[in-house]
Image: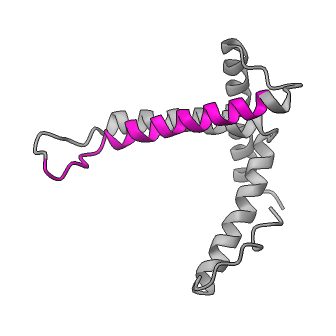
Amino acid sequence: METILDIEMMDKMDEIFNLQEQLNTRIGVTMKDMSDEDRTKWILNYIRAMQQELAELTDSVPWKWWAKYQKFDKQNAKVEVVDLFHFLISLAQVMGMSANDVYEAYLKKNKVNHDRQDSGYSKKDKNDSRHI
């Protein structure tokens, strides 16, 4: 049974997905009827963009143990996390996933991760996520 919180969460996720689709369309990335070749190109584009955003997030944290000048830039780190969401949502969309698809897959994968922890996760089971 869905709770009010679940419904509010999905409303927010749906809104984020809609906003991202509008932005992508404005940029010139239309995902409807995208060929497999274009889909592959955009999957790689979004992966590369996320790698760059992760590097920028890393630079927001004083990771150079030999450098004394660095400071934690919490504000910039938050912006980089949001940038990651932009590209991650775009990646999900180019793969044909809706906000609800991501939500449902997340719930299933979260359960798998908890099951792994409950069992001690001492052995890799490559089939434990096939149902997602």
In the orientation shown, which residue stands out farthest toward the right? 33
Q: Is residue 87 magenta?
A: no
Q: Name the residue: 67% across, 27% down.
A: 20
Q: Is residue 128 above or below residue 46?
A: below
**Principal SS element in the magenta part?**
helix
Q: Quadrant of residue 41?
A: top right
Looking at the rendering, in which quadrant would you find the N terminus? bottom right
Query: Of 92 and 48, which appears nearest the observer?
Result: 48
Left or right: residue 75 versus residue 9 is left
Residue 4 in the image, given as x and y percentages of width and height: 74, 51
Residue 33 in the image, given as x and y percentages of width and height: 89, 25
Q: Is residue 28 above or below residue 31?
A: above
Q: Name the residue: 62% across, 84% down.
A: 123
What range of the chain is rendered magenta? 38-66
Query: Of 49 and 115, which appears nearest the observer?
Result: 49
What coloring was used for the rendering?
one colour
Can residue 15 be seen at all in this image of the molecule? no
